Image: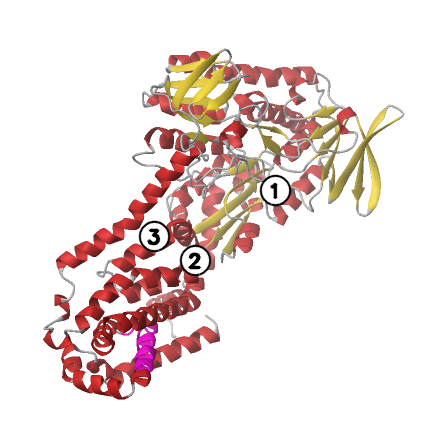
């Protein structure tokens, strides 16, 4: 805590101590006010403006310092100024004093408390941003909540000061009016408890419910306006219709059918979507084949002699397609039909919020879930339309290995495929516009991946801007600007891995007023609703993560919120979203890394463990990489973990579970891990943290104790 905060705290403590030491607190009793009531009234009659000003200043100071006596001052104000002027003076004085207390709390305590409990306050502030005014208004209306406590607690949140002021002024008005009015009978009052009766508290409580009722009415009006111009069917063919048979759509359909809802699934192309047919499954099959070639090429490290591997690329692709065929039954029409889902293999267009045209028929549903996925984004470079272009969609139709491959984009897909094709024998150049590969990861992670790819023969060019695609003497070239120079890169194929764009075209969204964000995904609330409350979205179409497990996570929320949202709905929680880049060694992360924590202003402490210390990694000949865990300073609470290691994705789950269920590094350290395994490195990392936080004073005392036990002189 800085000196300025300490000085203010000291001054506040002195003011509070002075209040009690001087005996001023004994003045604020009902008996004292009644005894001196005539003196106060005489002084007011003689100097009304001076007395009113002093009263106003004292009231503001009492409220700002959270000192007791505000109720009694309100009674006195009613006795002196009457109901009209008393209500005006005290209403403004109490609101200003409350706001000053709010600002003091914010200045002194919000930053350190937010740093200590970042995740908890992130959740609180999300709620405050959405419903803060309603919460505050409710608290102000019900007099059983101490107003000074409300001031201090709200100061820790990120509610706007102006919002706090006007809501406080309005919310405290009924209670203030009751006390000011009671001040007119100050001489007859026997106790403060007689002012606020149980019936009056109940009335305030009912009044406090009003904003929530009003909000529900506003939502009903908003809903009515959203559906204006559309006629709701009197009956429905289905409880839920899912458009898109990829990961998100399949999980949504599965969950809805499991709870016995009537479900229709519409997929115009292949069941399984991108993940099965052009993404996760084929890419991992290709990566495994490339790894086999790499293992043969580097087998001499283990004393095993082997010649340069002979790669039959057609058979490699045969292995890829066989993997797809083996997994296809999991996502097939037959399987989902047996689950009770009616599958339509047609194009779908929304006709109204409840109607979907499928081929030559129209289906009706109470709820519609959009899960149409995304496709590769191709940059608009001059000449690119004439180039032999590869994306994650058409890559799998190759039958011959590209001799010269330029990869445009150094994200996860670009890095994975660059390494794989280089291992299979292609000459690969990887072009990335950002200063590092894997731009969302910490710099050292990107540097590690770049170093690995370079050692395996990939030419990595970061900070390179693609300008155009040319064809000179029958040779295709990518023109780039790199390190201030214009260069040309010859290629046989240009593999574009420059991100993905949501599939929103042809669904009829424009006619329904369903809009998209700047990133091209659908505009949704935190419960995955579009502007039409019965139309939902999940998966790549929804963002912000284009990951299969993220799609499944969203699909659960879309299905449950659609079917049961009128009773209970759930906001999607992305805090513990793991992600893996399948280069070798793999890059796996969950939670914050240093780059994100710094950008968000979250205080953190870093614990590192080098995989070169892992016995299993040494035995496997894979000592490259590290583990980096971010924790709350001085605590074992995990904020995030990054693993760069062999098969890192397989044991990232240990950190994910720990974060999800609030298990700190001490719990990991106290858990038995099998030896020797790579996953044991998670426990070793916890040991590094523990060693850095060992109780030095206790250890010094123990050292003296054991010296005494041995009979040695101190």
Contact flag, marks 2 and 1 (Cβ < 8 Å):
no
User: Which residue: 20% across, 65% down?
Assistant: 178
126 sits to left or right of 293:
left
Q: Secondary structure at mark 2?
A: loop
Q: Position of residue 21 (x, y in %)?
A: 26, 85
Spatial separation of the CA atoms under disc 2 and disc 1: 43 Å
* Viewer-proximal residue among 246 and 502: 502
User: Which residue: 15% across, 66% down?
Assistant: 195
**In the image, which is nearer the foreground, mark 3 or mark 1?**
3
* Residue extent of the magenta highlight: 52-67
Spatial separation of the CA atoms under disc 3 and disc 1: 54 Å
User: Which residue: 73% across, 38% down?
Assistant: 431
Examine the image and state in which quarter residue 193 appears. Answer: bottom left
Q: Position of residue 597 (x, y in %)?
A: 52, 53
Q: Secondary structure at mark 1?
A: loop
Q: Residue furthest right?
A: 473
Marked residue nearer the N-terminal end (3 or 1): 3
What residue is disc 3 on? 134
What residue is disc 1 on? 624
Q: Residue 62 lies in magenta, yes or no? A: yes
540 sits to left or right of 316:
left
Q: Compared with residue 298, is residue 573 higher up or lower down, i.e. above or below? A: below
């Amino acid at each position: 805590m800085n000196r300025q905060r300490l000085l203010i705290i000291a001054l506040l403590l002195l003011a509070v101590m002075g209040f009690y030491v001087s005996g001023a607190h004994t003045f604020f009793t009902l008996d004292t006010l009644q005894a001196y009531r005539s003196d106060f009234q005489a002084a007011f009659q003689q100097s009304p403006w001076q007395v009113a000003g002093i009263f106003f200043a004292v009231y503001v100071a009492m409220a700002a310092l959270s000192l007791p006596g505000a109720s009694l001052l309100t009674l006195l104000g009613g006795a002196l100024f009457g109901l009209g002027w008393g209500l005006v003076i005290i209403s403004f004085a109490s609101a200003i004093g409350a706001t000053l207390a709010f600002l003091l709390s914010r200045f002194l305590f919000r930053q350190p408390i937010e740093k200590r409990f970042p995740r908890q306050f992130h959740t609180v502030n999300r709620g405050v941003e959405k419903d803060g005014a309603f919460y505050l208004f409710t608290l102000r209306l019900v007099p059983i909540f101490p107003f000074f406590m409300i001031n201090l607690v709200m100061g820790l949140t990120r509610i706007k000061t102006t919002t706090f002021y006007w809501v406080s002024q309005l919310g405290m008005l009924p209670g203030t009016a009751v006390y000011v009015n009671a001040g007119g009978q100050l001489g007859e009052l026997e106790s403060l408890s007689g002012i606020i009766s149980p019936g009056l508290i109940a009335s305030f409580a009912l009044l406090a419910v009003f904003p929530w009722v009003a909000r529900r009415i506003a939502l009903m009006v908003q809903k009515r306006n959203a559906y204006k111009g559309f006629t709701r069917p009197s009956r429905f063919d289905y409880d839920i219709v899912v458009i898109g048979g990829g990961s998100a759509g399949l999980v949504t359909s599965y969950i809805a059918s499991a709870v016995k809802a009537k479900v229709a699934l519409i997929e115009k192309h292949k069941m399984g979507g991108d993940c099965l047919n052009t993404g996760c499954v084929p890419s991992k099959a290709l990566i495994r084949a490339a790894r086999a070639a790499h293992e043969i090429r580097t087998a001499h490290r283990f004393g095993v002699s082997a010649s340069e591997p002979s790669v039959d690329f057609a058979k490699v692709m045969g292995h890829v397609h066989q993997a797809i065929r083996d997994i296809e039954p999991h996502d097939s029409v037959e399987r989902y039909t047996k689950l009770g889902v009616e599958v339509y293999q047609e194009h779908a267009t929304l006709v109204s919020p409840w109607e979907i045209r499928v081929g030559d028929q129209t289906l009706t549903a109470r709820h519609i879930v959009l899960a149409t996925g995304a496709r590769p984004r191709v940059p608009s470079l001059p000449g690119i339309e004439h180039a032999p272009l590869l994306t994650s969609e058409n890559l799998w139709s190759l039958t011959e290995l590209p001799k010269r491959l330029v990869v445009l984009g150094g994200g996860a897909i670009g890095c994975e495929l660059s390494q794989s094709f280089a291992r299979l024998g292609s000459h690969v150049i990887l072009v990335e516009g950002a200063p590092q590969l894997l731009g969302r990861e910490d710099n050292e992670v990107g540097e590690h991946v770049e170093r690995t790819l370079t050692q395996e023969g990939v030419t990595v060019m970061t900070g390179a801007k693609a300008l155009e695609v040319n064809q000179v003497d029958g040779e295709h070239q990518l023109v780039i600007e790199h390190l201030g120079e214009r260069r040309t890169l010859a290629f046989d194929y240009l593999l574009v891995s420059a991100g993905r764009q949501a599939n929103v075209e042809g669904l009829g969204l424009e006619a329904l007023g369903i809009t998209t964000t700047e990133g091209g995904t659908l505009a949704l609330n935190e419960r995955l609703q579009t502007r039409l409350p019965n139309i939902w979205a999940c998966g790549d179409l929804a963002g912000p993560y284009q990951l299969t497990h993220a799609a499944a996570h969203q699909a659960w929320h879309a299905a449950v919120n659609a079917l049961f949202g009128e009773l209970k709905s759930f906001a999607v929680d992305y805090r513990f979203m793991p992600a893996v880049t399948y280069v070798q060694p793999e890059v796996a992360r969950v939670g914050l890394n240093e780059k994100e924590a710094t950008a968000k202003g979250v205080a953190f402490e870093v614990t590192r463990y080098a995989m070169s210390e892992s016995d299993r990694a040494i035995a496997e000949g894979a000592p490259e990489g590290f583990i980096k865990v971010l924790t709350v300073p001085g605590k074992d609470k995990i904020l995030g973990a990054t693993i760069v290691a062999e098969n890192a994705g397989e044991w990232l789950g240990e950190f994910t579970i720990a974060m999800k269920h609030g298990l700190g590094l001490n719990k990991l350290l106290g858990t038995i891990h099998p030896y020797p395994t790579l996953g044991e490195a998670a426990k070793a990392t916890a040991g590094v943290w523990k060693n850095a936080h060992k109780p030095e004073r206790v250890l010094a005392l123990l050292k003296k104790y054991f010296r005494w036990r041995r009979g040695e002189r101190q």
